[in-house]
Image (cartoon, rainbow, N blue to C red):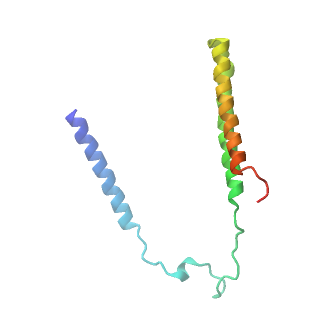
Amino acid sequence: MMFLLVMFLIVMLIGIVLLLINIFISMKKNNFREKNTSFECGFDVFFKSRMPFSVHFYLIGVLFLVFDIEIILLFPMINSLKILSMFNWYYISMMLLLILFFGLEMEIYNGILKWII
């Protein structure tokens, strides 16, 4: 038991030392404004080159991902019908569908699914 503790501490110490070496070696000291801006023939940038990204589309993507994972959880329910009794299968299925429904209701209540940005 003591051997495992010593090995764990050695591994942690080596990891921390390597992390600190990486931090000290990779520090860049040239944080000038001119170095971080784009070069347009010596002039300052007139406008931003990229359009602002709406967080609404990101939230829709996250919701799509969450509901995809929840739908994937429904697929094994078909095979579990052979193993479980009908009452247990129905109870578990309804609980999962209620969780999906309450999640959708919460998203509608918080205004995430509004299409007017």
Give the percent coordinates (x, y) of residue 79.
Answer: 66, 18
| Residue 37 location, quadrant | bottom right
- Image point 67% across, 37% down: which residue? 102
What residue is at 71 percent from the left and 41 percent from the top?
A: 105
Between 109 and 58, the one lying in front of the other is 109
Above or below for 93 versus 33: above
User: Which residue sits at x=64%, y=30%?
Assistant: 73
**Is residue 96 positioned above or below 50 on the image?**
above
As drawn, the residue found furthest toward the left would be 2
Q: Residue at x 69, y 30 (%)?
A: 97
Apparent side of residue 53 relative to residue 29 in the rendered image (left or right): right
Q: Position of residue 87 (x, y in %)?
A: 66, 14
Q: Is residue 93 above or below residue 59?
A: above
Percent x, y of residue 74: 67, 28
Q: Quadrant of the N terminus?
A: top left
Q: Is residue 96 above or below residue 30?
A: above
Residue 55: % across, % down: 68, 58
Q: Residue furthest bottom?
A: 42
Q: Quadrant of the C terminus?
A: bottom right
